[in-house]
Image (spheres, rainbow, N blue to C red):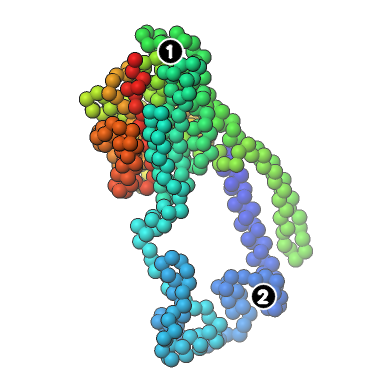
Amino acid sequence: MLHTTVRLFCSVVAALARLVRELRIRAAMSSPVGLIATAPLPLRRKTKLLAALAPPQPPVVARPAEACDAVVSGAGAVVDQPQQQSESKRKKMTAWSARGRPSRLVVPVADDAGWGAAAAAAKEADVEVEGDGFWVASRAGPRHAMEDAYSVVTHKNGGDSQLAFYGVFDGHGGRAAVDFVSQRLGENVVSAVLAAGSAARDEASSEDDDAISAAIRAAYLATDSELLTQHQVRVRTTTVIEMKKNDFFEIIINGWFDLWTQQDASGGACAATALVSGGGLYVAHLGDCRAVLSRGGGAAAALTADHTCAAEGERARIERGGGFVSRSGSGVWRVQGSLAVSRAFGDAGLKRWVLAEPAVARVPLRAGEFLVVASDGLWDKVGNQEAVDVVARGRTAAAVARSCAELVDMARRRGSRDDITVMVIDLERFVR
């Protein structure tokens, strides 16, 4: 709410500043020389102001399109026409230059594919990582800066080589939230599980399983609390309006912004994480990142259910809390008409309805299994079984690495314009 108020206030100030500038220009119009010398304007605006001062002129016939003296190339650079122009066209150009009118630019319309290719070239390079029992492929979408991230914590935590954490994160509203969560969540989860005690990490009883699940939930909520605190913004603004001569207002604004981060506090992040502990696999998630398990026979089993406003349970929960869910023109259900996911880290303005409490599932580890964890940029275009089948074609390290990149390419070919991150985790090495 504070952030919205500040933005509204800044918009009002900007509008008043433009009004002051326009009033000064009109005051200077009594001296055309002074207007041009002290307040240079864009060509179109200057022409209108000077025309108001000048005596009426006879009507001018519109300039023919073929008399243009420049065109814009597909790359955006201005290119002169060939020198072999007819004498008549040269005379027309000279005549129009004498009238002081600018040349018309002919701008060719580029197709969407060309724009996408150019934008993609400006993005950061594709990321392909091969680690100890895991593989990652990631590619930014063409629409904005990369907002996906991943995290792995495996280095014999607490002397337990069987304890490992993996996560894929999908940010929205900027990189601040996803950067923070990817750096902190793994450490918080591992610390919480270790603090639960060695007994809670043994496979066997349902009480132990509940203790680990509870530790994971607590780590998620603690990370969200840290993120919201990190993104608090304190604004102290003093505005003094002083009356000046000529009935103009001089607006002097002195603002002090104490920002604990440089990013917008309105952003958030979805997550899907896997914790291997004591022969069990614990999968937790928020939002629409997804984890899919390949069982021994190659059948895909989704271990997560997307937290979206289309889910009846999530919609009912939001409405019970006093919120609403509406459908956008594209057919997507959104919280308060804004956010498409119903659970996420951050999103301070919607925190009353967008929870950070994850769903946690536990499955026992068996030989021959692997896990595919990815952001929604993949799952919007590729099915669960399709993803498992692509990875299962080859089980060597090089083949799995290629399959991650292949899944990214598959989603992009099918029209995904979102960021895409795919992680494959070999679970067989944790089987005792």
Which image quadrant is residue 334 in?
Answer: top left
Comparing 3 with 149, the one in front is 149
| Helix, strand or loop status at disc 2 | helix
Residue 288 visible in the displayed image: no
- Quadrant showing the C terminus: top left
Vertical relation: 416 (above or below) 371: below
Position of residue 416 relative to residue 200, above or below, is below
Secondary structure state at the residue bearing disc 1: helix
Q: Residue at x 49, y 27 (%)?
A: 185
Residue at image x 52%, y 78%? 102
Residue 184 in picture, x, y percent from top left: 52, 29
| In the foreground, 396 or 106 | 396
Left or right: 160 as drawn, with respect to 373: right
Residue at the location (68% across, 78% down)? 32
The residue under label 2 is 36
Give neighbour class at mark 2: few <14, some 14-19, many 20+ (Cα, 10 Å).
some
Q: Is residue 14 left or right of residue 338?
A: right
**Which circle marks residue 201 in the picture?**
1
Comparing labels 2 and 1, the label whose residue is closer to the camera: 1
